[in-house]
Image: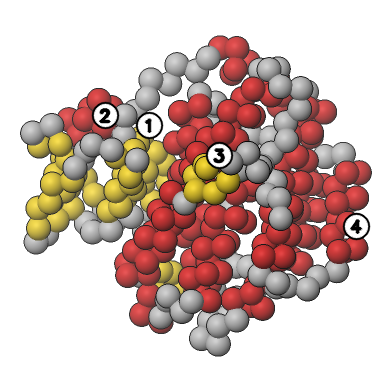
Amino acid sequence: MDNIYIFSDGELRKKNNTIEFISKNNKKILPINNVQDIKVFSNVSFNNKFLALLTKYKIALHVFSYYKNYMGSYIPDDLNYEGKTLLNQVNNYQIYEKRLYLAKMIIFSAINNMKNNLKLYKINYDENKIKKIIIKLNEVESTDQIMIVEAEFRRFYYSNFDNIINNKNFKFEKRSKRPPQNEINSVISFGNSVFYSECVRIINKVRLFNCIGYLHSNERNNSLSLDISEIFKPIIIDRLVFDLFKNNEFNKKDFQKMKNGIYLSTSGKKKFIKSYDEKLKETFILNNNNKHISYRELIENELYSLKNYINKQEPNYIPFMERM
């Protein structure tokens, strides 16, 4: 299944049972077969007939702001949440011990996958430092404390980014988000935002409720997608960022300064999206069982695993932890 990305201003509309995109100087028919997502990064209008077409073909529409932050999605599936799953999802949040268990497992997985990035890119690090952080994580008794422990590990992890990337033209220095203060941070933020929308679509496909997360605050509508993304951002988004900069795929023209921050230009976004799509389709052998699986399928499997645990079909929830 493919994604369609819209970077130009214009109009999306239904034409002869397919999609037509009309921009200032062009009209283009977008094949509707084998499409699962449309991601819009520009000012685009559409009407009810267009949304009805998306519903018919079960195509999700994701919208991003001027500064490329994820804003929201139109999910065409009938959201008939399974009553049992919804009640169990709420139950696992309200019983604090259960919520704490799930939050800890998500961060254990995230730390493991970040640590493997340091191994993969041959960064020397103090194993005892990581062990001490893991011990702290075992001992904490609240999700707020989990976030503090995670932040401690991330500071250590981020301190190695410039050594991994090793690009004289671009420096990471430290993580900055709102707004990103340099080119590397802008690509990380853009990639994370696009990846959140991927998780939103799959969460709805699996019939979980995105408003109920276990690590992030449920004051946000997409808290479960934020939770799940913690597991996979290190092995998908971070590695894309590392490789794109290490291989000098970006130049200064791929970025622009806006609103006191640095953001990807249209050319930069297109470069990232091309590699991002290829990454999600990439397959690998999972757990030495000779079965090839794509990263997109891996995310879906993860959510089914969480759903099975919530519905008490599995005794434990062990998130994906890459073995190296």
Q: Amino acid at mark 3?
A: Lys
Locate residue 18: give its quadrant. Answer: top left
What residue did someone put label 4 on?
132
Q: Which element carries disc 1, helix, strand or loop?
A: loop
Residue 98 placement (x, y as % from top left): 78, 27
Q: Identify the residue at the far bottom of this view.
A: 168
What residue did someone put label 2 on?
57
> How far apart are the two marked residues, 1 and 2, measured between alpha carbons?
11 Å
Q: Which element carries disc 4, helix, strand or loop?
A: helix
Locate residue 19: give its quadrant. Answer: top left
Q: Amino acid at mark 1?
A: Ile
Residue 251 placement (x, y as % from top left): 41, 80
Q: Nearer the viewer, mark 1 or mark 4?
A: 4
Locate residue 313: give its quadrant. Answer: top right
What residue did someone put label 1 on?
75
Q: Is residue 166 above or below residue 324?
A: below
What residue did someone put label 3 on?
291
Q: Nearer the viewer, mark 4 or mark 3?
A: 3
Q: Residue at x 24, y 49 (%)?
A: 44
Instruction: Tell whether 125 sits left or right of 6.
Output: right
Q: Which element carries disc 3, helix, strand or loop?
A: loop
